[in-house]
């Protein structure tokens, strides 16, 4: 259970303050690579078929956690850039 604790700490660090406009633009470029997208599609198909192993369940939960954090970071970055352009 150490990975989720580390992920939670990482989230708190990343979300503690608004990024600078330059950092916001860089954050918006952060995306999953093609290999990770393919793996997530594979895991999603197995989840729909209810054939995930316990290890794959953990893996898909980690992908979900990272995706959620990435969504929050992107939202925060867009807010910063919108304020700067207003």
Image (spheres, helix red, strand yellow):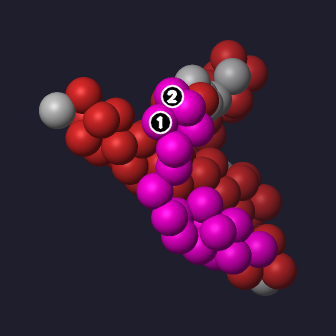
Locate residue 49 relative to residue 66 in the image: left or right: left
Percent position of residue 70, x then y: 52, 46
> As drawn, which residue projects farthest toward the left?
86
> As drawn, which residue projects farthest toward the right?
2
| Cα distance between the residues tagged 2 and 1 | 6 Å
Percent position of residue 11, x then y: 60, 66
What's the mark number on residue 21? Answer: 1
Mark 2: which secondary structure? helix
Q: Quadrant of the N terminus?
A: bottom right
Percent position of residue 66, x then y: 60, 52
Check if residue 9 falls in the magenta segment.
yes
Is the Cβ of the residue at disc 2 closer than 8 Å to that at disc 1?
yes
Check if residue 2 falls in the magenta segment.
no
Towards the viewer: 77 or 71: 77
Above or below, comparing residue 42 to residue 9 in the picture: above
Towards the viewer: 64 or 13: 13
Q: What is the magenta range? A: 6-25
User: Which quarter of the picture shows residue 40?
Assistant: top right
Towards the viewer: 60 or 15: 15
Mark 1: which secondary structure? helix
């Amino acid at each position: 259970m150490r990975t989720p604790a580390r992920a939670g700490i990482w989230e708190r660090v990343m979300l503690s303050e608004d990024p600078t406009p330059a950092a916001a633009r860089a954050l918006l470029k952060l995306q999953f690579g093609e290999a990770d997208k393919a793996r997530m599609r594979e895991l999603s198909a197995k989840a729909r078929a209810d054939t995930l192993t316990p290890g794959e369940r953990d893996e898909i939960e980690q992908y979900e956690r990272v995706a959620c954090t990435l969504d929050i970071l992107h939202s925060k970055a867009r807010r910063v850039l919108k304020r700067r352009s207003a």
